[in-house]
Image (cartoon, rainbow, N blue to C red):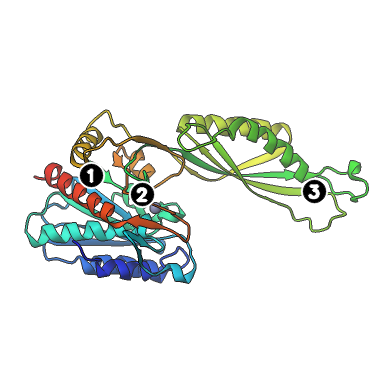
């Protein structure tokens, strides 16, 4: 494949952000329609407005190898939704994260179908990864709408051929404080709800916001918001809500952190609500099938693939919760979630060849 597939230009042009359900559907339509073949079966779902699809060989309805791509993207300026070439780079919203891979995988499936050599492989397309993946991957697995594969190939992290071994757990907390209003000239007569929150935050920050760089295996805390109903500068605020986003290496540490935060909050009369949570994932490269993948990939590429502990999260956590191993690695690229998102095209094609060879070897039946 030396040309740029038309479907990639089409896909990048679709503003498939969470707030545009029709565009999410259109993105799934483009991939499904482009890679149609009588030997392939397409299953489609729409859960809470989030469309998803599985393209799989009719003779292998429960594929051993599952290729994964989400087609939703984070918002960007309208001019980002245009595929541009810059030297060896493809640029545009979603080229790296991760529409290119839907196209590369679709081309593989169609190639096998045309040659009537389809291995046991499927392509899963979802459209809600950027907003949590609950109505895509999680729902499909929990409702048993898709069968468990042996391995998932997910180029949604692990930039430049790093193999992700761990993704952190995430926890979104809302801490609510009450207080007592007073005139701003006599703060000693009131109880300032925002100050209570700030003092608690300082304790949480000291204990749990210790990560300083990618992969250091430590937890982080983002103080996202502090809100109050108070609008006047001369009133002591009597209520406040603080929103935190915590990323914690393991589920066990995450549970312990929540218990500690609740204890500390209780001492000062602050209540804690878990507004969102996600488990961590761990990838075991010492055992089948990830061990075999790494060995195969290193031989194919002629280089060592380093391990990476990742701060972010992906849909891999849902596969992990179902005991399904996931390979997270991707070719050279960068600028995800920025206006300068790019992917090296030759490197992307090398990735496609790797997946082709691996799938033909390990997905043969
Ligand atoms: Zn992504």
Give the numbered dot on residue 149: 1
Residue at (28% x, 58% y) in the render: 102
Ligand 1 neighbours mark 1 (CB distance < 8 Å):
no
> Residue 14's image quarter?
bottom left
Residue at (63% x, 41% y) in the render: 272
- Please report whichever mark, 1 or 3, sits nearer to the chain's N-terminal start: 1
The quadrant in which the C terminus is found is top left
> Residue 83's image quarter?
bottom left
**Foreground mark, 3 or 2?**
2
Looking at the image, the residue that sits furthest to the right is 185
Residue annotated with mark 2: 156
Q: Please rate how many residues cluster around mark 2, counting C-alpha atoms within 10 Å: few if below 14, some from 14 to 19, many from 20.
A: many
Point out residue 184 in the picture as x, y percentages from the top left corner. 89, 50
Residue annotated with mark 3: 238
Disc 1 secondary structure class: loop
- Please report whichever mark, 1 or 2, sits nearer to the chain's N-terminal start: 1
Residue at (58% x, 31% y) in the render: 259
Please indicate whether residue 18 sits to the left or right of residue 177 in the image.
left
Point out residue 95 in the picture as x, y percentages from the top left corner. 36, 60
């Amino acid at each position: 494949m030396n040309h740029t597939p038309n479907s990639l230009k089409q896909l990048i042009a679709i503003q498939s952000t969470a707030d545009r359900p029709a565009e999410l559907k259109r993105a799934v339509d483009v991939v499904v329609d482009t890679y149609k073949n009588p030997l392939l079966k397409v299953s489609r779902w729409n859960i809470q407005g989030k469309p998803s699809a599985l393209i799989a060989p009719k003779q292998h309805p429960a594929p051993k190898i599952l290729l994964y791509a989400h087609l939703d993207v984070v918002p960007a300026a309208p001019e980002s939704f245009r595929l541009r070439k810059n030297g060896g780079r493809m640029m545009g919203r979603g080229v790296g994260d991760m529409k290119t891979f839907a196209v590369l995988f679709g081309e593989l499936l169609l190639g096998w179908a045309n040659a009537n050599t389809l291995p046991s492989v499927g392509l899963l397309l979802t459209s809600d990864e950027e907003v949590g993946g609950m109505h895509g991957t999680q729902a499909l697995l929990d409702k048993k709408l898709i069968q468990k594969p042996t391995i998932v190939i997910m180029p949604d992290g692990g930039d430049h051929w790093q193999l992700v071994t761990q993704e952190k757990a995430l926890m979104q907390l809302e801490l609510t404080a009450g207080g007592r209003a007073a005139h701003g000239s006599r703060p000693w007569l009131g109880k300032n709800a925002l100050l209570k929150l700030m003092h608690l935050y300082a304790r949480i920050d000291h204990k749990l916001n210790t990560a300083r760089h990618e992969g250091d295996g430590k937890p982080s805390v983002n103080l996202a918001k502090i809100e109050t109903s108070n609008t006047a500068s001369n009133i002591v605020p009597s209520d406040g809500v603080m929103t935190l986003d915590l990323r914690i290496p393991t589920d066990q540490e995450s549970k312990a952190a929540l218990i500690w935060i609740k204890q500390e909050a209780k001492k000062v009369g602050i209540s804690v609500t878990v507004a969102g949570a996600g488990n961590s994932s761990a990838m075991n490269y010492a055992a089948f099938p990830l061990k075999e993948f790494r060995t195969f990939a290193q031989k194919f590429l002629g280089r060592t693939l380093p391990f990476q502990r990742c701060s972010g999260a992906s849909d891999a956590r849902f596969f992990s919760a179902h005991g399904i191993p996931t390979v997270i690695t991707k070719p050279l690229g960068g600028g995800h979630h920025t206006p300068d998102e790019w992917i090296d095209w030759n490197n992307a094609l090398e990735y496609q060849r790797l997946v082709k060879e691996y799938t033909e070897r390990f997905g043969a039946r």
